[in-house]
Amino acid sequence: MPLRRPPLLVLALLVVLALVAGCGGGGDEQRTPGDPVSTAEADVLAGLLYRDFQEGGADFVVTAPYAEGAVLTLTGEIDFARGIGRAQGVTEYADGRPDDTRTLFFTGTDIWFGDVPRLAEELTAAGLPAAGYVRRPIAATGADGTASLIDVLVQMVPRLSARAEDDPRSFTENGYTWQGSRSVNGELASVFRTGGGATVTVAADSGLLLQYVTRLPDQEFDVTITLADHGEREIGLPADEETVDATAHPEVAAALGL
């Protein structure tokens, strides 16, 4: 799993986490892909991320085909109310290499890695007790001003919610357009494009966010986040006694590539 490459500008995270949204059209008038959003659609857009917060959480799948023949997928669930998530991270390779799998937990500040190869050996070598997880702060930026892909992805998911509605005028005045209808996981939805080029797919009946797709600056691949089964979540983080702190033991983290 790529824990340090490819480098991604932290600025990209701020760009893609702007309020982006969509809603059901709700009318019989003829629409052409590329038409500006209507006032009614803007009203739904304004509350999209707030509705995620009100629902409490969701299942999610994040895909990032970051290199030719390599795809990183995070599959898990997020508690939007507390900003806590857990996922299985799997990197699949087209060249025959076995999948690289990790168990991940994350908050707004920290990330836990489980199923880490050589963890037991490195802990023994360092004279530390056995543990199943390594915790480190989410890297806002490295020495070169970039963040790792995994750090960017786990920050994107919880920020697909907001504690208040946005101003509907921001969607009619900033280039948001209707792109048509499609089905996501069996749900009829409307697709919208933001002024920055991201696409957002929103359930026609519930007005809930189903999918968000964006291309990060200076990258040549799209990140796709798909949400499903919105509702409250209770996610427990690994216990301290099961966790080694990478900040307190940087030699262990360095040896493991974390």
Image (cartoon, rainbow, N blue to C red):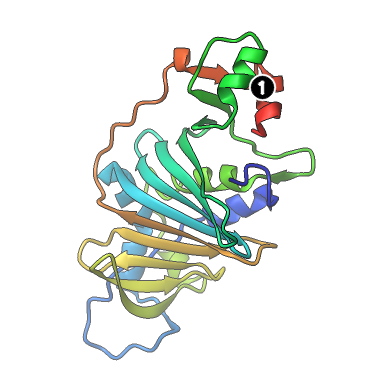
Residue that appears at 23% across and 68% down: 186
Q: Is mark 1 on a helix, strand or loop?
A: helix
Q: Is residue 165 visible?
A: no
Q: In this view, does 138 lie to the left or right of 229?
A: right
Residue in the foreground of this view, choosing between 23 and 150:
150
Is there any visible trace of residue 46 in the rendered image? yes
Q: In which quarter of the image is the C terminus?
A: top right
Location of residue 58 with respect to 202 vertically, above or below: above
Q: Quadrant of residue 87?
A: top left
Nearest the eye: 213 or 239: 239
- In the rendered structure, the answer to whether residue 185 lies left or right of residue 109 reads left
Q: Residue at x 60, y 65 (%)?
A: 221
The residue lying at 61 percent from left, 13 percent from top is: 124
Q: Check the picture and name the quadrant holding the N terminus.
A: top right
Decide if residue 14 is on the left or right side of residue 50. right
Q: Position of residue 104 (x, y in %)?
A: 47, 36
Residue 161 image position (x, y, % from top left): 39, 47
Q: Name the residue under label 1.
A: 252
Q: Nearer the viewer, residue 231 or 258?
A: 258
Q: In this view, does 222 lie above or below 33?
A: above
Q: Which amino acid does label 1 sit on?
A: Val
Q: Is residue 6 left or right of residue 73?
A: right
Where residue 215 appears, x then y in whole percent?
Answer: 58, 64
Where residue 47 appears, x then y in whole percent?
33, 56
- Compared to residue 32, the image places residue 209 above or below, namely above
Badge 1: residue crowd in 10 Å (few <14, some 14–19, many ≥20) = many
Indicate the quadrant where residue 82 lies: top left
Residue 213 drawn above or below residue 86: below
Which residue is at a point 66% across and 17% down the rendered structure image?
249
Q: Residue furthest front?
A: 96
The residue nearer to you, when weighing 51 against 241, is: 241
